[in-house]
Amino acid sequence: MATANRMKKGTDSLPSYSWEEINKHSEKSSRWIVIDREVYDVTNWSKKHPGGSSVLGHSAGQDATEVFQAMHRNNLSYVNKFLRPLKIGRLEDSEVVPHMDIRQDFAKLEKTAAKMGLFDASFTFFAIVFLHIVVFDIASYLVLRYYGSGWIPWMISITLFTTAQVQMGWHHHDAGHLSIFKNNTLNRFYHKLLICLMKGTCSHWWNHLHYQHHAKPNVIGKDPDVRVEALFVVGNVMPVETAKSQEKVTMPYNWQHRYFLIIGPPLLFPVYFQFMNFRHAYTRKLWLELAVMVSFYVRIYLMYAPLLGGLWGFLLYYEINRVLESTWFTWVSQTNHIPMTVEKDESHSANTWLTAQLKATCNVEKSFFNDWFTGHLNFQIEHHLFPQMPRHNLYKIAPLVKSLCEKHDVTYKVKSLKAGFLDVISSLKKSGELWLHTYNEFHPM
């Protein structure tokens, strides 16, 4: 292996490496990452990584300092125990890490947030969140039990049940980001309890996808949330590349802003997520998680089927709930991302943590309703910058983030909820038209 063999001065006898050499180790067979100018070989460790091997693979051959610190803020000392044996050298002193001014200012902001106590969770807040979910869940059952399954109590019940499920989605997201308890083992246990037992969803599957999204938001081929080219093209890069590579039209992408309304928000949960959840648990042999997931469906069947006239009445109730839940979730999540920059990693990896997250995310205006409706993901910018910060503190750090963006001329976008929804459609329309224009250019009649 061709490596720089100049040795680091001092007691550390490990070699120093150039960026040219480090960049070569970006494949599954050899994965190196750089953290605080130290070089680590994570090829084998990536298979054991709790967040999944793909998260480490996406940063292979790159500087992973900021993503590492953001995703492990609560347990840096613990994680460092696993890093030490993986260290193989350090970055050559002559090699430069770009944009150190922004990186240093962001590190100062993170320390300021810690001093302000913004990484400390309010157990009162999360207790209220959990209890209000339980109230909605119980109320949905009681409405049917005491008022029957006529269309008015049926509609009230399914509205309550759907609200409970959506709010549970926001809440398990809190636990999945380790932002509720100081003990990460307790966070992970609570996350499994919420997502598996109370939503029938695989926690391992969620971690596998969601951590990739945070590590490389809106990066083509790395963020699972924009791995959608089979049905949609988003941003300015994907439409062009898809059009150039196509021999014949497989989807009328120029109509995607219309068919999105039919096959996007309504079907994401009841079709795609439902299948992928069980497929993931089965193929990974996660038998305990699978059993707990099944117990959720057994529980709601035993509760609701007798009140809804049996199996078919229950299936109708549940599937309509899934359509409603899917619609709610998809509009909230895509409002913050689809209208933003979608790029390849060659561009993304040149960004700092701050600039990468601000290019891929935007905020929705704060209000009591918006906070509740989105699970505080209207502060998507702050959540992406500080994924382990409890959501009830995101608005407190927002003014400081905005000031830092102004200092470094980074665009900080805030929209109304309505404007955010409309931007999803307009951005899909724009990307679809770009695809059509490119396809006609490269494949003339």
Image (tube, rainbow, N blue to C red):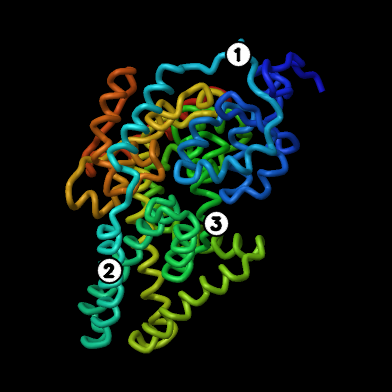
Q: Is residue 252 visible?
A: no
Kind of residue sitting beneath label 1: Glu
Q: Is residue 274 visible?
A: yes
Residue plotted at (34% across, 22% down): 410
Q: Residues within 10 Å of mark 3 (few under 14, many from 20)?
A: some
Dot 3 or dot 2: first in sequence order is: 2
Q: Which mark is residue 95?
A: 1
What residue does disc 2 label? 131
Q: Secondary structure at mark 1?
A: loop
Q: Residues within 10 Å of mark 2 (few under 14, many from 20)?
A: few
Q: Residues within 10 Å of mark 1 (few under 14, many from 20)?
A: few
Q: Is residue 193 left or right of residue 306?
A: right
The answer to which of 404 and 369 lies nearer the viewer is 404
Q: Secondary structure at mark 3?
A: helix
Residue plotted at (51% across, 21% down): 350
Q: Position of residue 174 (x, y in %)?
A: 38, 54
Q: Secondary structure at mark 2?
A: helix
